[in-house]
Amino acid sequence: MRGAGLAGGSDRADRDAHAAGGRVTAGVPAAVAALTRLRPRLAAAGLGLGLAHVGEPGLCPAGPAEASAAATMTPGRRREFLAGRQAARRALRAVGVDCGEIPREGRLPVFAPGGAASISHSAGIAVAVARAPGEHAPLGCDLELRPLPCDAARLVLAPDEEPLLGTPATAGGGPWSLTGLFSAKEAAWKALHLVPGRAGTASMRTLRDLWAEPYGDALHIGPRLDPHVGPRIDPHIAPSSRPRNASRAGQSYGVRVRVLPVGAGVFSYAVGWADADGRSTPEPTARRS
């Protein structure tokens, strides 16, 4: 799997690991420190990073709406929920936004105007990313610290995407894993669903309704307009040389997602919008023929 190296450390990483569950050497998952060391890379992409752990002391609702939601949950789910809210507040604080309680509508967090974050949980760790107010880049992240079994591929990948498995992610990089591709699609799903009224999102029911293909140091992911027709991906052909596929006929946008190693797992985040050809674009605008 490709991404930044996680070796080395910093005083900031150690302080964040303390805040997320105790001493680094006694009980805090190594993934917390590894994620913290990604902070400069995410900041360079305009993202604030927030972390929390279900074992850290002081986790409590930030207001009556969070308390009401937490009261309906089992103890384990309650700790996960509160850790996610704490991670989101920390991510927003990193981009200069003070945030109080974060209520929910259904299963989705509801942020006050001027604030938004994407939250993910895995193995007791909550991670969130946020952008500064006024930014229009996509927002989505996913953390997966438990590998997916190979027989789950049919739930994640369409037949045309299966050739990606085991192929090098980048020159000199490790192969794409099912866990990495799943995580990337999860991050893209969150980012794409935050764009109301865009063609294709209404047909997104499962991860197989998204197509994914490599593009530079990221994956290019977007909704299939026709879930029954997929791109003919040959991972050995440069993206710029691939023929346009029928599933993207008339397609106007997608997201670029990076997948980084975090210990034995992966962390994925949306880094920008992409046009139908995978090139960077400031916003998901319609193709004009």
Image: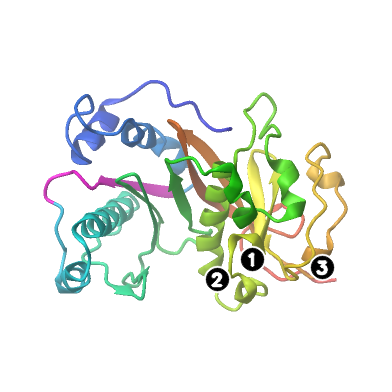
**Is 119 above or below relative to 204?**
above
Q: Residue furthest top?
A: 8
Specify few, some or many for label 3: CA neighbours under 10 Å numbering under 14, 14-19, or 20 or more: few
- Residue, x 68% and y 68% (percent of image)? 285
- Residue, x 58% and y 65% (percent of image)? 206
**Is 8 above or below relative to 82?**
above
Report the mark closest to the observer, 3 or 2: 3
**Is 238 above or below relative to 88?**
above
Which residue is label 2 attached to?
A: 195
For the residue labelled by badge 2, is the local secondary structure a helix, a strand or a loop?
Answer: loop
Q: Which residues are magenta?
A: 47-58
Amino acid at the residue labelled 2: Val
Which quadrant does the N terminus fall into? top right
- Residue, x 22% and y 24% (percent of image)? 25
Which quadrant does the C terminus fall into? bottom right
- Out of 162 and 271, give the one closest to the viewer: 162
The disc, 1 or 2, on the residue closer to the chain's N-terminal end is 2
Report the mark closest to the observer, 1 or 3: 3
Amino acid at the residue labelled 3: Ala
- Residue, x 59% and y 60% (percent of image)? 207
Which residue is label 1 attached to?
A: 284
Which residue is label 3 attached to?
A: 249
Contact (CB < 8 A) between labels 1 and 2?
Answer: yes
